Amino acid sequence: MESLSVVVPCFNEEQNVERFYEKLINSTEFLKDRSCGLEIIFVDDGSFDKTYDRIMSVRSNDDRVRLISFSRNFGKEAAMFAGLEKSKGDYVVIMDCDLQDPPELLAEMFKYIDDGYDSVATRRVTRKGEPPIRSFFARCFYKLMKKISATEFVDGARDYRLMTRQMVNAILSMPEYNRFTKGIFGWVGFKTKWLEYENVERVAGETKWSFWKLVGYSIEGIVAFSTKPLMIASAMGVFFCLLAFVMIIFTIVRKLVFGDPVSGWPSLVCIILLLSGIQFFCTGILGQYLARTYMEVKRRPLYVIKEEL
Protein backbone atom coordinates (compact mmCIF):
# COMPACT_ATOMS: atom_id res chain seq x y z
CA MET A 1 0.00 0.00 0.00
CA GLU A 2 1.37 3.41 -0.99
CA SER A 3 1.48 6.31 1.44
CA LEU A 4 1.95 10.08 1.47
CA SER A 5 4.02 11.93 4.05
CA VAL A 6 3.16 15.60 4.63
CA VAL A 7 6.05 17.53 6.19
CA VAL A 8 4.89 20.70 7.98
CA PRO A 9 7.58 23.01 9.46
CA CYS A 10 6.11 25.16 12.25
CA PHE A 11 7.46 28.13 14.15
CA ASN A 12 5.00 30.07 16.33
CA GLU A 13 1.97 28.92 14.34
CA GLU A 14 -0.50 28.36 17.16
CA GLN A 15 -3.26 30.16 15.24
CA ASN A 16 -2.83 28.03 12.13
CA VAL A 17 -2.14 24.43 13.21
CA GLU A 18 -5.76 23.32 13.61
CA ARG A 19 -6.98 25.26 10.56
CA PHE A 20 -4.24 23.73 8.45
CA TYR A 21 -5.00 20.22 9.73
CA GLU A 22 -8.71 20.49 8.96
CA LYS A 23 -8.14 21.82 5.45
CA LEU A 24 -5.48 19.19 4.74
CA ILE A 25 -7.75 16.34 5.84
CA ASN A 26 -10.57 17.65 3.65
CA SER A 27 -8.21 18.03 0.68
CA THR A 28 -6.77 14.52 0.94
CA GLU A 29 -10.03 12.56 0.74
CA PHE A 30 -8.98 11.52 -2.77
CA LEU A 31 -6.21 9.36 -1.25
CA LYS A 32 -8.83 6.81 -0.19
CA ASP A 33 -9.77 6.20 -3.83
CA ARG A 34 -6.18 5.34 -4.68
CA SER A 35 -5.65 3.30 -1.49
CA CYS A 36 -2.91 5.64 -0.35
CA GLY A 37 -2.12 6.07 3.33
CA LEU A 38 -1.33 9.38 5.01
CA GLU A 39 1.06 10.58 7.69
CA ILE A 40 1.37 14.19 8.82
CA ILE A 41 4.71 15.21 10.31
CA PHE A 42 4.60 18.49 12.23
CA VAL A 43 8.09 19.80 12.96
CA ASP A 44 7.97 22.26 15.85
CA ASP A 45 11.01 24.44 15.23
CA GLY A 46 11.50 25.66 18.79
CA SER A 47 8.24 27.61 18.99
CA PHE A 48 7.70 29.66 22.14
CA ASP A 49 3.94 30.08 21.79
CA LYS A 50 1.33 27.30 22.04
CA THR A 51 2.19 25.60 18.74
CA TYR A 52 3.29 22.44 20.57
CA ASP A 53 -0.01 22.25 22.50
CA ARG A 54 -2.05 22.72 19.31
CA ILE A 55 -0.16 19.92 17.58
CA MET A 56 -0.66 17.63 20.57
CA SER A 57 -4.37 18.42 20.54
CA VAL A 58 -4.62 17.44 16.88
CA ARG A 59 -2.51 14.34 17.47
CA SER A 60 -4.74 13.13 20.30
CA ASN A 61 -7.56 12.66 17.79
CA ASP A 62 -5.57 11.28 14.85
CA ASP A 63 -2.82 8.68 15.13
CA ARG A 64 -1.59 9.62 11.64
CA VAL A 65 -0.14 12.81 13.10
CA ARG A 66 3.52 12.71 14.15
CA LEU A 67 5.46 15.36 16.05
CA ILE A 68 9.12 16.29 15.97
CA SER A 69 10.00 18.97 18.50
CA PHE A 70 13.39 20.74 18.33
CA SER A 71 15.34 21.79 21.42
CA ARG A 72 15.47 25.35 20.01
CA ASN A 73 14.82 27.25 16.78
CA PHE A 74 17.13 25.81 14.10
CA GLY A 75 15.37 27.42 11.12
CA LYS A 76 13.02 26.24 8.40
CA GLU A 77 15.78 24.56 6.38
CA ALA A 78 16.63 22.27 9.30
CA ALA A 79 12.93 21.61 9.96
CA MET A 80 12.32 20.57 6.36
CA PHE A 81 15.36 18.29 6.37
CA ALA A 82 14.25 16.67 9.63
CA GLY A 83 10.77 16.05 8.22
CA LEU A 84 12.18 14.51 5.05
CA GLU A 85 14.57 12.38 7.08
CA LYS A 86 11.83 11.04 9.35
CA SER A 87 9.22 10.56 6.61
CA LYS A 88 8.24 7.02 5.61
CA GLY A 89 5.90 7.63 2.68
CA ASP A 90 6.38 6.63 -0.95
CA TYR A 91 5.58 10.27 -1.72
CA VAL A 92 6.50 13.31 0.35
CA VAL A 93 5.16 16.84 0.19
CA ILE A 94 6.44 19.90 2.06
CA MET A 95 3.82 22.45 3.09
CA ASP A 96 3.76 25.62 5.19
CA CYS A 97 1.37 25.69 8.12
CA ASP A 98 0.06 29.18 7.30
CA LEU A 99 -2.04 27.87 4.36
CA GLN A 100 -0.09 29.87 1.80
CA ASP A 101 0.44 26.47 0.18
CA PRO A 102 -3.08 25.46 -0.93
CA PRO A 103 -3.75 21.81 0.09
CA GLU A 104 -6.41 21.54 -2.63
CA LEU A 105 -3.61 21.39 -5.23
CA LEU A 106 -2.55 17.96 -3.96
CA ALA A 107 -5.06 16.06 -6.10
CA GLU A 108 -3.76 17.74 -9.26
CA MET A 109 -0.18 17.12 -8.17
CA PHE A 110 -0.79 13.39 -7.93
CA LYS A 111 -2.16 13.33 -11.48
CA TYR A 112 1.19 14.55 -12.78
CA ILE A 113 3.03 12.03 -10.58
CA ASP A 114 0.89 9.33 -12.21
CA ASP A 115 1.93 10.74 -15.61
CA GLY A 116 5.55 9.96 -14.84
CA TYR A 117 6.88 13.09 -13.16
CA ASP A 118 9.23 12.65 -10.21
CA SER A 119 8.32 15.98 -8.68
CA VAL A 120 5.49 18.50 -8.86
CA ALA A 121 6.59 21.96 -7.73
CA THR A 122 4.64 25.18 -7.26
CA ARG A 123 5.38 28.79 -8.08
CA ARG A 124 3.50 32.00 -7.44
CA VAL A 125 2.64 34.07 -10.49
CA THR A 126 1.74 37.08 -8.34
CA ARG A 127 3.12 38.49 -5.10
CA LYS A 128 -0.11 40.03 -3.87
CA GLY A 129 0.15 41.21 -0.28
CA GLU A 130 3.95 41.52 -0.27
CA PRO A 131 5.71 44.89 0.16
CA PRO A 132 6.75 46.19 -3.30
CA ILE A 133 10.43 46.55 -2.36
CA ARG A 134 10.51 42.94 -1.15
CA SER A 135 8.96 41.70 -4.39
CA PHE A 136 11.40 43.78 -6.44
CA PHE A 137 14.48 42.37 -4.73
CA ALA A 138 13.08 38.82 -4.90
CA ARG A 139 12.74 39.09 -8.68
CA CYS A 140 16.24 40.57 -8.92
CA PHE A 141 17.60 37.65 -6.92
CA TYR A 142 16.11 35.04 -9.25
CA LYS A 143 17.36 36.90 -12.33
CA LEU A 144 20.82 37.04 -10.81
CA MET A 145 20.84 33.34 -9.93
CA LYS A 146 19.85 32.39 -13.46
CA LYS A 147 22.91 34.23 -14.74
CA ILE A 148 25.53 33.09 -12.25
CA SER A 149 24.44 29.52 -11.43
CA ALA A 150 24.13 26.37 -13.51
CA THR A 151 21.37 25.14 -11.18
CA GLU A 152 17.76 25.82 -12.17
CA PHE A 153 16.07 28.62 -10.22
CA VAL A 154 12.44 29.52 -10.95
CA ASP A 155 11.06 32.93 -10.03
CA GLY A 156 8.30 32.65 -7.43
CA ALA A 157 9.19 29.05 -6.53
CA ARG A 158 7.79 27.78 -3.25
CA ASP A 159 9.01 24.98 -1.00
CA TYR A 160 5.59 23.40 -1.59
CA ARG A 161 6.54 20.36 -3.64
CA LEU A 162 5.37 16.76 -4.01
CA MET A 163 8.21 14.31 -4.57
CA THR A 164 8.75 10.61 -5.09
CA ARG A 165 10.78 8.65 -2.57
CA GLN A 166 13.65 8.43 -5.07
CA MET A 167 13.97 12.21 -5.21
CA VAL A 168 13.66 12.53 -1.42
CA ASN A 169 16.49 10.05 -0.96
CA ALA A 170 18.63 12.09 -3.37
CA ILE A 171 17.99 15.23 -1.29
CA LEU A 172 18.82 13.37 1.94
CA SER A 173 22.14 12.32 0.43
CA MET A 174 23.14 16.01 0.65
CA PRO A 175 23.35 16.63 4.44
CA GLU A 176 25.25 19.90 4.05
CA TYR A 177 25.07 22.33 6.96
CA ASN A 178 24.48 25.50 4.95
CA ARG A 179 21.26 24.56 3.18
CA PHE A 180 19.38 26.35 0.44
CA THR A 181 16.65 23.85 -0.39
CA LYS A 182 15.31 25.68 -3.45
CA GLY A 183 18.73 25.22 -5.02
CA ILE A 184 19.04 21.61 -3.83
CA PHE A 185 15.72 20.77 -5.51
CA GLY A 186 17.12 22.01 -8.80
CA TRP A 187 20.57 20.48 -8.31
CA VAL A 188 19.36 16.90 -7.82
CA GLY A 189 17.39 17.18 -11.06
CA PHE A 190 14.55 14.70 -11.80
CA LYS A 191 11.59 15.32 -14.05
CA THR A 192 9.60 18.22 -12.57
CA LYS A 193 6.21 19.70 -13.41
CA TRP A 194 5.58 23.30 -12.35
CA LEU A 195 2.13 24.38 -11.16
CA GLU A 196 1.32 28.08 -11.11
CA TYR A 197 -1.09 29.77 -8.74
CA GLU A 198 -1.82 33.24 -7.44
CA ASN A 199 -0.28 34.21 -4.15
CA VAL A 200 -2.31 33.34 -1.06
CA GLU A 201 -1.89 35.50 2.01
CA ARG A 202 -1.39 34.02 5.47
CA VAL A 203 -4.57 32.97 7.26
CA ALA A 204 -3.32 34.29 10.59
CA GLY A 205 -0.13 35.39 12.30
CA GLU A 206 2.84 37.22 10.86
CA THR A 207 5.59 36.10 8.52
CA LYS A 208 8.83 35.05 10.21
CA TRP A 209 10.87 36.27 7.23
CA SER A 210 11.97 39.88 7.63
CA PHE A 211 13.62 41.73 4.74
CA TRP A 212 17.10 41.28 6.21
CA LYS A 213 16.53 37.58 6.90
CA LEU A 214 15.64 37.18 3.24
CA VAL A 215 18.80 39.08 2.25
CA GLY A 216 20.86 36.67 4.35
CA TYR A 217 19.03 33.70 2.87
CA SER A 218 19.74 35.04 -0.63
CA ILE A 219 23.44 35.31 0.15
CA GLU A 220 23.27 31.70 1.36
CA GLY A 221 21.86 30.67 -2.01
CA ILE A 222 24.45 32.60 -4.01
CA VAL A 223 27.39 31.20 -2.05
CA ALA A 224 25.98 27.65 -2.06
CA PHE A 225 25.30 27.43 -5.79
CA SER A 226 27.75 29.71 -7.54
CA THR A 227 31.47 30.50 -7.48
CA LYS A 228 31.02 33.46 -9.83
CA PRO A 229 31.48 36.02 -7.01
CA LEU A 230 35.01 34.66 -6.47
CA MET A 231 35.69 35.02 -10.18
CA ILE A 232 34.37 38.61 -10.09
CA ALA A 233 36.64 39.43 -7.13
CA SER A 234 39.63 38.00 -9.01
CA ALA A 235 38.74 39.89 -12.18
CA MET A 236 38.43 43.15 -10.26
CA GLY A 237 41.87 42.59 -8.74
CA VAL A 238 43.44 42.01 -12.16
CA PHE A 239 41.66 45.03 -13.64
CA PHE A 240 42.84 47.45 -10.94
CA CYS A 241 46.39 46.09 -11.08
CA LEU A 242 46.47 46.80 -14.81
CA LEU A 243 44.89 50.22 -14.26
CA ALA A 244 47.49 51.06 -11.60
CA PHE A 245 50.32 50.01 -13.95
CA VAL A 246 48.94 52.21 -16.75
CA MET A 247 48.60 55.19 -14.39
CA ILE A 248 52.19 54.74 -13.19
CA ILE A 249 53.46 54.82 -16.79
CA PHE A 250 51.27 57.86 -17.50
CA THR A 251 52.62 59.73 -14.45
CA ILE A 252 56.26 58.99 -15.37
CA VAL A 253 55.77 60.06 -18.99
CA ARG A 254 54.00 63.26 -17.95
CA LYS A 255 56.83 64.12 -15.56
CA LEU A 256 59.55 63.48 -18.16
CA VAL A 257 57.79 65.26 -21.06
CA PHE A 258 55.99 68.13 -19.38
CA GLY A 259 57.78 68.37 -16.06
CA ASP A 260 54.44 68.52 -14.19
CA PRO A 261 54.78 67.86 -10.48
CA VAL A 262 52.61 65.14 -8.96
CA SER A 263 49.77 67.01 -7.25
CA GLY A 264 46.14 66.74 -6.30
CA TRP A 265 45.84 65.14 -2.87
CA PRO A 266 41.98 65.21 -2.88
CA SER A 267 41.88 62.97 -5.95
CA LEU A 268 44.54 60.75 -4.36
CA VAL A 269 42.41 60.33 -1.23
CA CYS A 270 39.36 59.42 -3.36
CA ILE A 271 41.38 56.81 -5.25
CA ILE A 272 42.72 55.32 -1.99
CA LEU A 273 39.19 55.12 -0.53
CA LEU A 274 37.86 53.53 -3.74
CA LEU A 275 40.56 50.86 -3.85
CA SER A 276 40.26 50.21 -0.11
CA GLY A 277 36.52 49.73 -0.49
CA ILE A 278 37.03 47.30 -3.37
CA GLN A 279 39.60 45.37 -1.35
CA PHE A 280 37.24 45.06 1.61
CA PHE A 281 34.42 44.03 -0.75
CA CYS A 282 36.53 41.26 -2.28
CA THR A 283 37.74 40.17 1.16
CA GLY A 284 34.09 40.01 2.25
CA ILE A 285 33.28 37.70 -0.66
CA LEU A 286 36.14 35.41 0.33
CA GLY A 287 34.94 35.60 3.94
CA GLN A 288 31.47 34.39 3.03
CA TYR A 289 32.84 31.28 1.35
CA LEU A 290 35.36 30.70 4.14
CA ALA A 291 32.70 31.05 6.85
CA ARG A 292 30.51 28.43 5.21
CA THR A 293 33.47 26.11 4.76
CA TYR A 294 34.23 26.57 8.47
CA MET A 295 30.67 25.60 9.42
CA GLU A 296 30.74 22.57 7.13
CA VAL A 297 34.00 21.10 8.44
CA LYS A 298 32.79 21.25 12.06
CA ARG A 299 30.08 18.72 11.10
CA ARG A 300 27.57 19.90 13.68
CA PRO A 301 24.11 18.31 13.41
CA LEU A 302 21.49 20.30 11.50
CA TYR A 303 19.08 20.02 14.42
CA VAL A 304 18.63 18.58 17.90
CA ILE A 305 15.38 16.76 18.71
CA LYS A 306 13.90 17.35 22.13
CA GLU A 307 10.89 15.09 21.64
CA GLU A 308 9.60 12.80 18.90
CA LEU A 309 6.15 11.23 18.96
Image (cartoon, rainbow, N blue to C red):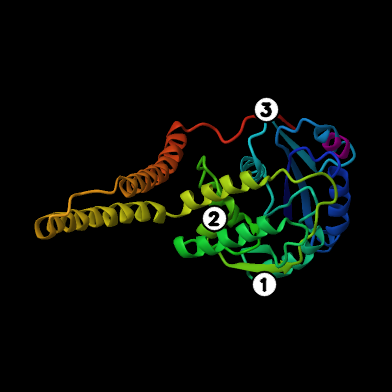
The residue at the point 42 percent across, 42 percent down is 284
Q: Is residue 70 above or below residue 198?
A: above
Q: Which amino acid type is shown beneath numbered disc 3? A: Ser
Is residue 161 visible in the rendered image? The answer is: no
- From the viewer's side, name the closer residue of 38 and 20: 20
Q: Earlier in the sequence, mark 3 or mark 1?
A: 3
The residue at the point 78 percent across, 55 percent down is 100
Q: Residues within 10 Å of mark 3 (few under 14, many from 20)?
A: some
Q: Quadrant of the N terminus?
A: bottom right
Say if the magenta span includes residue 57: yes
- From the viewer's side, name the closer residue of 297 and 217: 217
Q: Secondary structure at mark 1?
A: loop
Q: Secondary structure at mark 3?
A: loop
Q: Which amino acid type is shown beneath numbered disc 2? A: Gly
Q: Which amino acid type is shown beneath numbered disc 1? A: Asp
Left or right: 251 with respect to 4?
left
Q: Secondary structure at mark 2?
A: helix
- From the viewer's side, name the closer residue of 134 and 13: 134
Residue 38 screen position, x and y as percent: 78, 51
State how far apart marks 2 and 1 are (Cα).
25 Å
The residue at the point 90 percent across, 39 percent down is 61
Residue behind mark 1 = 115
Prevailing secondary structure class for the magenta stretch in the rendered image: helix
Residue situated furthest left in the rendering? 256
Left or right: 230 with respect to 96?
left
Magenta span covers which residues? 54-58
Q: Quadrant of the C terminus?
A: top right
State how far apart marks 3 and 1 are (Cα).
41 Å
Q: Mark 2 or mark 1: which is in front?
A: 2
Say if the magenta span includes residue 37: no
Q: Earlier in the sequence, mark 2 or mark 1?
A: 1
